[in-house]
Amino acid sequence: MSKLSGDEQGIILGQLRNSLEPRLAMYFSSASTELRALLTPAVQQQLRTDYEVATALCVKMGMCVESGIPSCKELREASKIKNTRKEGLSADDLATLGLLGSVLPALECFSEGSGSAGPDGVQRLAEGLSAGALPAVTQFDLDGLHVGDAGASALAAALDRGALPRLRILGLIKAAIGDAALVALAPALRRRPMLEHLYLCDNPFGDEGLAALVAPPTPAGTPPLPTGGLKKLRTLYLDDTWVDDAGCAALAAALDSGALPALQTLTLAGITASAAAIDAVREALARSRAVAIASAERAAIDAMHEKLATIERSRAECCGVRVETWS
């Protein structure tokens, strides 16, 4: 440690500062004079304060109480956080959870939808998510929370700096997402190569927001993204939104162009578009599914042929005979 610079020692201490388990920093500092010097009384007090805040949140969430003594062990090891209580988390609580995102390696599912956090709860949650935060989370549900323009922009920024790297399922039902919010969020969602399920029901966005999500304009001379682009999206819920005929036309065009090759389930109940526009989208989805099925069948046949060819080549090598490969 003595050979490291002050900045490098500070980085190590920063990694050891865990609000859910502050003892780590204390243990390591006891074995290192350099870390002990960095762990000033002020830093120790901040660790204690952060731990108390985290513990209070655990108690409020009905977890982490062992033998009557508050503890953060359950939250540290939790694979799922799902609020089913009438009393939801406050904006301060969501901000704390965001800051804890980097020390929740086991968490796979987060669901908070009480709607009691106010207009800035999601924004504060997202602002606390650092690069690599919530590394194992595949399902992230904010149904019923107010996302709005500011929350959508903050969530997009969090995704772009590397939070939620394994995100597969995103729930934003009844989240006050209008056109501006979806336009802000759409590019980040299109850069998530693992995104498979997107739930956007009961939001006030319309044609502009949907077009930004499924068929954004590409500036002249700009190459397409090498990954992402909703290529793996299997489910898209758009019920009770303000999508009209123009949005349906953009969606149908995206389907026909192959921009949504994996899409299987698409819901459009309660949107403002005409019956004819909705039927056109359904027909485009049917065509897209037919293409996908044919492609999958062809891939399976090619894989079978390649396997048979490998077997034949192996036999030929044993016999010293050259054989033609399958075509």
Image (cartoon, grey):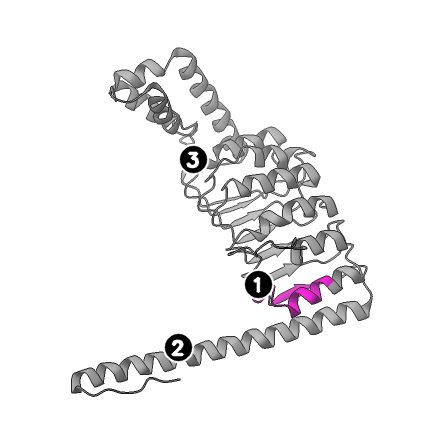
Q: Which mark is residue 303?
A: 2
Image quadrant holding the C terminus, namely: bottom left
Badge 3 local density, few (<14 within 10 Å), some, or many (20+)? Answer: many
Q: Which residue is situated farthest in the left direction here?
A: 319
In the displayed structure, 9 sits above or below 74; it is above
Earlier in the chain: of badge 3 and badge 1, it is 3
Look at the image and give the residue range highlighted in magenta: 250-268
Image quadrant holding the N terminus, namely: top left
Where residue 102 appears, as percent x and y from the top left, is 45, 36
Where residue 310 appears, as percent x and y from the top left, is 29, 79
Q: Is 58 in front, or is 235?
A: 235
Instruction: Name the residue that disc number 1 marks.
Output: 234
Among the 4 quarters of the image, the one containing residue 254: bottom right
Where residue 304 appears, as percent x and y from the top left, is 38, 80
Q: Kindly identify the amino acid type of the residue bearing the numbered disc 3.
A: Val
User: Distance from label 3 to label 2 (Cα)?
Assistant: 42 Å
User: Distance from label 3 to label 1 (Cα)?
Assistant: 30 Å
Judged from the image, the secondary structure of the residue bearing numbered disc 3 is helix
Instruction: Name the residue that disc number 3 marks.
Output: 103
Q: Residue shown at 55%/53% (left/top)?
A: 169
Q: Residue shown at 60%/41% (left/top)?
A: 155
Q: Kindly identify the amino acid type of the residue bearing the numbered disc 2.
A: Ala
Contact, mark 3 vs mark 1 (Cβ under 8 Å)? no
In the displayed structure, 245 sits above or below 3; it is below
Q: Is residue 264 magenta?
A: yes
